[in-house]
Amino acid sequence: MTRAPVDTIVAPLFPRGLPWVNAPAGGVSAIQRGRPMLVEFWDFCRPSSMRTLPYVKAWHERYGPAGLRVIGVHCPGFEASRAEQAVRDAVARLGIEHRVLIDSELEVWREYENLGWPARYLFDGHARLFDYHYGEGAYADTELAIQELVDVRLEPLEPLRPEEVPGALLEPQTEDQAGAYSGRYEAGGVWAVLDGAGTVTVNGGEAPGGRELTVAHPGAYPLIEHERHTVSELHMEIGAGVRCLATCFTPGIAP
């Protein structure tokens, strides 16, 4: 666990005037008081955020009744995820039921001196920092810290992917690339950040290893998933009406 170095780091107040989703009108200031609070910085156009999201949703469902407040602070890493309506549409599309603060100008990000996506900060019932984590992973550690605060004991969620099993040995993946990338890569999976409407063809669009996907909204789209770290070739054809903002690679377990 990454416990706070001291117990006097207090959650900054959320700025007034920022739009919320799934939050009661006028109740924003009370969210931080009296109950443990998990603050998750995310972006629906970031593959790492999308891979973490199922855990955050499950924690809200599991521990919300015991008092946990989950706050997703949406901070755009791409222009396509900056507009308020785009965030609202993504929250609905992804079935997110916890509160989401739309921080399009990164005001909350700066208050927290946040370092990237995803990032989570767990505060106790007095809004004091209790546990934190940057990046993917450490899901069981976060869940055990939540359980300690809400006094609930459950078996932590099973890892969703082999590379998320505690102690899994991972190989470094190819670095993310701006725009559409075609060529050799090493990774456990490949995602694309896409905007617009149309089709994208991956590796010829025919099995094995190929597919054609329909783009209907901005977001992070999974292209390829390997069972473990793999060396392979990627070829993307971007159809009319679609923009590829980035090609992203996710880690895989060592072969």
Image (spheres, helix red, strand yellow):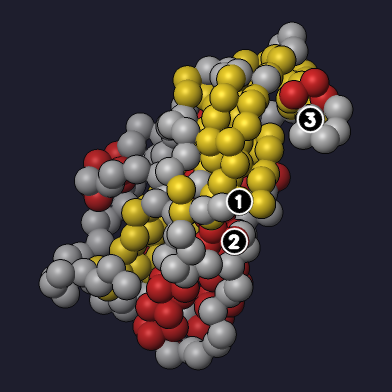
**What residue lies at 74% left-to-right and 9% top-to-bottom?**
240
| Residue most extreme to the top | 240
Q: Quadrant of residue 230?
A: top right
**What residue lies at 46% left-to-right and 59% top-to-bottom?**
169
Can you identify the residue that label 3 sits on? 210
**Number of the label disc, if any, that sits on residue 228:** 1
Between discs 1 and 3, the one toward the N terminus: 3
Label 1 CA crowd tier, 10 Å (few <14, some 14–19, many 20+):
some
Between discs 3 and 2, the one toward the N terminus: 2
- Front of the two marks 1 and 3: 1
Can you identify the residue that label 2 sits on? 162
Q: Considering depth in this image, is 194 or 138 the residue closer to the camera?
A: 138
| Residue most extreme to the front | 255
Q: CA distance from mark 1 to mark 3?
A: 18 Å
Q: Can you give x and y, in whole percent of width and height, for residue 231 in the image?
A: 58, 36
Q: Can you give x and y, in whole percent of width and height, for residue 241 in the image?
A: 72, 12
In terms of secondary structure, where does tag 3 sit?
Answer: loop
